[in-house]
């Protein structure tokens, strides 16, 4: 399936090697436009997470995205740890390789944890933070801690297999649920899209993806998230049972001065409800950078 996306280019990350990234460059006539890092969520690729977002956001900013370690076809296959802090260091290395002074980190789900860790570890590289469908902590209950531990041990329960796309109907079920919520059919109907989404998810390294889940379960920013000192906004999915909506709101209210945009959608909103998600993200970026030139 053809994705309307910025072109690929290769950069070199010291100590890590080459990395393929999406890079739109600045919008025409806007050489000083902000640089936006689109940091994707767990199990998916950058293209699957952001395929509906690339083009509209590239009108206002330089858009940069990449597959995180072990994810997608292009993610680094390093033997290093899959801690959120290591993924945040990768993001910082991307910014330095691009030669830009500062960037805005936009993180979705697990990518939101990475974006938070990036601010904590590399505050000099960020001029803004947008956190979408994410939380301060993911392994809070006994059941959650057990599930994350099982993933880290590389066990693969049936429900995880579906989430990873090893069972193709899982993606189709998510799409149908969003269609029911919207009261309409998605725009392309989309056996081709379903197959492409399945392949994008399966392209990741299962070992790395599971280790990322174990480390995500250990992430907790609650002790320091109130210290964020760059402009920031939160996009909350109001019908989310993957990262519970209550956790997303807790994050938003723990931040010192967050602009909060809530949409009536589930965790797949970035792909399946772009009619709601993209305007919310655009408004979040307005809150961080001011309204984009029209």
Image (cartoon, grey):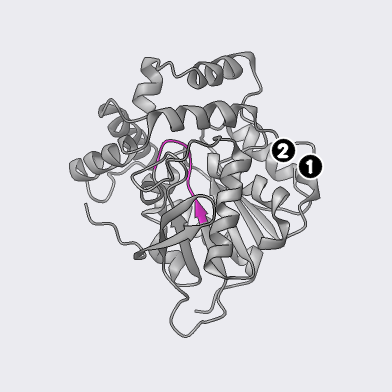
- The reply to whether the magenta stretch includes residue 184 is no
**How many labels, in total?**
2
> Which residue has dot 2 on it?
221
Quarter of the figure with residue 76: top left
In this view, 111 is above or below 127: above
Query: Residue drawn 21% across and 51% down?
Result: 1
Name, please, the residue furthest toward the front.
15
Say which of 121 and 277 sits in front: 121
Q: Left or right of 230: which side holds 67?
A: left
* Residue 40 drawn in magenta: yes
Q: Position of residue 141 (x, y in %)?
A: 64, 18
In this picture, residue 76 sits left or right of residue 246: left
Inspect this view and state whether residue 109 appears. Answer: no
Q: Position of residue 132 (x, y in %)?
A: 56, 47
Question: Which residue is pictured at 57% across the width and 62% down the height?
Answer: 95
Secondary structure under the numbered disc 1 in the rendered image: loop
Q: Is residue 231 visible?
A: yes
User: What is the C-alpha distance between the residues marked 1 and 2?
Assistant: 6 Å
Q: Magenta stretch?
A: 38-44
Q: Residue 214's x, y, as percent?
A: 55, 26
Q: Quadrant of residue 99?
A: bottom right
Sort mark 2 into few (<14), some (14-19) or many (20+) by Cα contacts within 10 Å.
some
User: Residue 165 at x, y = what percent?
Assistant: 32, 30
Residue displayed at 66% across by 23% down = 140
Q: Where on the picture, by quarter, is residue 190?
A: top left
Q: Which mark is residue 224?
A: 1
Q: Say which residue appears at 77% left-offset and 57% top-offset.
A: 229
Task: State if disc 2 and disc 1 touch (CB < 8 Å).
Answer: yes
Task: Give the label on residue 207, or none.
Answer: none
Main SS, magenta region, reads loop
- How many C-alpha atoms fall within 10 Å of the one at disc 1: few (<14), some, or many (≥20)? few
At mark 2, the secondary structure is loop
């Amino acid at each position: 399936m053809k994705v309307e996306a910025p072109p690929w280019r290769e950069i070199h990350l010291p100590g890590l090697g080459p990395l393929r990234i999406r890079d739109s460059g600045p919008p025409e006539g806007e050489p000083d436009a902000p640089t936006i890092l689109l940091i994707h969520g767990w199990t998916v690729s950058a293209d699957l997470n952001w395929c509906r977002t690339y083009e509209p956001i590239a009108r206002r900013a330089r858009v940069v995205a990449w597959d995180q370690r072990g994810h997608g076809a292009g993610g680094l296959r390093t033997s290093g740890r899959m801690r959120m802090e290591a993924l945040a260091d990768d993001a910082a290395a991307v910014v330095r390789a691009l030669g830009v002074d500062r960037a805005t980190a936009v993180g979705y789900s697990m990518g939101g944890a990475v974006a938070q860790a990036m601010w904590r570890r590399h505050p000099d590289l960020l001029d803004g933070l947008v956190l979408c469908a994410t939380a301060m902590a993911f392994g809070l209950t006994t059941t959650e801690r057990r599930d994350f531990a099982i993933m880290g041990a590389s066990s693969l329960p049936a429900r995880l297999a579906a989430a990873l796309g090893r069972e193709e109907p899982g993606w189709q079920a998510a799409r149908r649920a969003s269609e029911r919520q919207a009261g309409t059919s998605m725009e392309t109907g989309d056996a081709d899209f379903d197959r492409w989404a399945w392949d994008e998810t399966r392209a990741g390294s299962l070992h790395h993806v599971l280790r990322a889940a174990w480390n995500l379960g250990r992430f907790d920013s609650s002790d320091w998230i109130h210290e964020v000192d760059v402009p920031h906004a939160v996009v909350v999915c109001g019908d989310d049972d993957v990262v519970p909506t209550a956790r997303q709101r807790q994050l938003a209210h723990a931040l010192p001065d967050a602009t909060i945009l809530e949409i009536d959608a589930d965790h797949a909103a970035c792909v399946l409800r772009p009619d709601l998600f993209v305007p919310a993200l655009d408004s979040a970026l307005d809150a961080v950078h001011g309204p984009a030139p029209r």
